[in-house]
Image (tube, coloured by chain):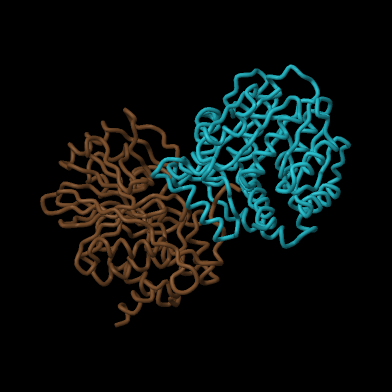
Chain colours: A brown, B cyan
Amino acid sequence: MELEKTIRLLKEGKHLSEERVYDICLKSQELLITEGNVTHVDTPVTICGDIHGQLHDLLTLFEKSGGVEKTRYVFLGDFVDRGFYSLESFLLLLCYKIRYPDRITLIRGNHETRQITKVYGFYDEVMRKYGNSNVWRYCCEVFDYLSLGAIINNRIFCVHGGLSPDVSTINEIKAIDRKQEVPHEGAMCDLLWSDPDDVDKWSLSPRGAGFLFGSNEVEEFLHTNGFELIARAHQLVMEGYKEMFDGGLVTVWSAPNYCYRCGNVAAVLKIDDQLERNYTIFDAVQPQDGVGNAIIPTKQPQMDYFL
Amino acid sequence: MTNLAIQQTDYDAFSSKIAAIQRGYLPPSSKNALNQDYDDADAWLSKLYINFKELHMNYLNVLRSKNRRVYSKINKASLNSFPVMNYGTYLRTAAIDLSVLQYLNDSTFDKFQIVNLGAGSDLRMIQYLNMFPDRLENFVDIDFAEAVQLKQGIINDLGFKNDKYHLLACDLKQDIKKTMETLESRLDLSTPTIIITECMLCYLPETQSQLLIDNCMKSFEKGCWISYDPIGGDQPSDRFGKIMKNNLQESRGLDLPTLLIYSSTEKYLQRWAADNKAESTILDMWQFHNKYISAKEMARLRSLQFLDEIEELKLMQLHYVILQCEWQ
């Protein structure tokens, strides 16, 4: 079957024709357009954080957590940028979405935008691999259709970044017109950019977008909506995950040895039918030289250090 | 390790600087950018960074006509610089200049001299000679012969000529006697001397870096050593240094012999501690960031580009240090 073949090629990091990529993007868009801004998902489910183009580590993630054939997944966004295989990672997830639409939920991260991907590597990766930006444009079209959040068993709220001062109920998220480039401010922007922190009220974010929010904001949001947990990604956590505010919020990070230099481990969070939390920790794939899957292609630009 | 691998790090440093300039990070804002406790801080900084952008862009333009290969390397790298790198380059530049100015501000002496070891394409000699035309007696830049030749050609074309400036070829890995002879050929040992090592000591083997420090501090009667380098980190769970060492070794044959030896601020500082009359301070660059960059300046930097990962910035800056050691 054509899709199975495409999946195999993507796993091997092989080149796909522009037409094939267009086809995948169009099919995913047709699926995503039917989903709401906030998708409802049932347990058991495995929650995954940032991937950032680390294809080989994404394959490890599936391997360590059961695989999409047997397991349901929620991905919290940031599929692209920084790593060397943004395109393959994103397309693989889209192919899984087409192949197993009920088993995979994709939420938009702050990197899934035209503006950010032009700065952080995905655009350049496509130019390098195709010599033109068509494939990047197809992918950006898909970005605009990704959900903004998911709710597991009506008890766990999944989002890429965090809360927004403009959002107190889920209905307010449902009212957003999401099919657009992520704005620089407002509810949609905040959901993708905000961070939890030790603050007693909404505060300015050092990232230049979104807000910092503290335990008060989290408690209120959980209470108002009848939730027990906010599961989000967006921030590098050296230990792979970090619970805050008496377990009312967790950050899940799934890109081990981020940018091939940070030395962190990665995690995914499995939620069972009793809403028990089980973390699986995994490490980066070791670079291999010469034959086969060299993790860092030899002709890549230099990794970033101050020299 | 070949000298070429070390020499090429200059292109990284210079392209990072160009990127930070083009994106508006550098120079620091001339009003309340840095938390300083002396009165003239703003005036000094704005004087130091006068025509900063123009100076660097002119240098890059002349480089283009001198060496197309190096130019295209630098130009390409500068176009692909991530915000986290631009931030770090800003911090690195500010930290070194701030240390120099602080030392001069606290000083009671008049005349002084500056040595930049492994200077590469750094243009501080022009900035400082312009800023202190009377007080600055000598400015010496040291680097590999090839680097010196290229730089000399460029500054000739730029029309920069100053009798107090000496651009000297010297391999700092070689016999320390030769290094000291080179330094003493142009510098006066009794004049207060600022020695800058910006990502230089980290490429030297342990013994040579210690010999260099010891000999300079012994030969120059009075001075201030200002050093910026990576440190490997010394927490058991910290893998940053080990990964950095492997990455650079594998991707470009660049060795960092002491990264995992002087792995913490305390260990890095030890090398200057042999002289018990010396007074040293060291900060990791995240501490520097939190202590010296004003809220106003942080807001300005924030507005330039979206920074996608604060944690990454912090992690990286925790693994670089700025040291200042005064002796007399």
Residue visible at 81% across and 25% down in the picture? B190
Which quarter of the rendering shows the C terminus of chain B?
top right
Residue A19 quadrant: bottom left
Left or right: where B93 falls relative to B69 = left
Residue B117 seen in the current view? yes
Horizontal side of B165 relative to B281 (left or right) equals right
Residue B121 shows in the view: no
Q: Residue at x 67, y 44 (%)?
A: B208
Please state which of residues B204 and B155 is positioned toward the viewer in this rendering.
B204
Q: On the image, which quarter does residue A204 sit in?
A: top left
Task: Identify whether B124 is placed above or below B62.
Answer: above
Indicate the position of residue A90 as horizontal and vertical percent values.
38, 64
Q: Position of residue A51 (x, y in %)?
A: 37, 57
Q: Nearer the viewer, residue B270 or A38?
A: B270
Q: Residue furthest bottom?
A: A1
Determine whether, in the image, residue B190 is placed left or right of residue A220. Answer: right
Most distant residue in the right direction: B163
Count of marks, rendered view: 0
Give the vertical position of B1 relative to B111 (above or below). Answer: below
Position above or below: A183 against B28: below
Q: Is residue B140 above or below residue B203?
A: above
Q: Residue at x 48, y 64 (%)?
A: A296
Viewer-closest of B225 and A239? B225
What x and y, as percent, mark residue A131?
Answer: 55, 71
- In the image, is B6 to the left or to the right of B140? left
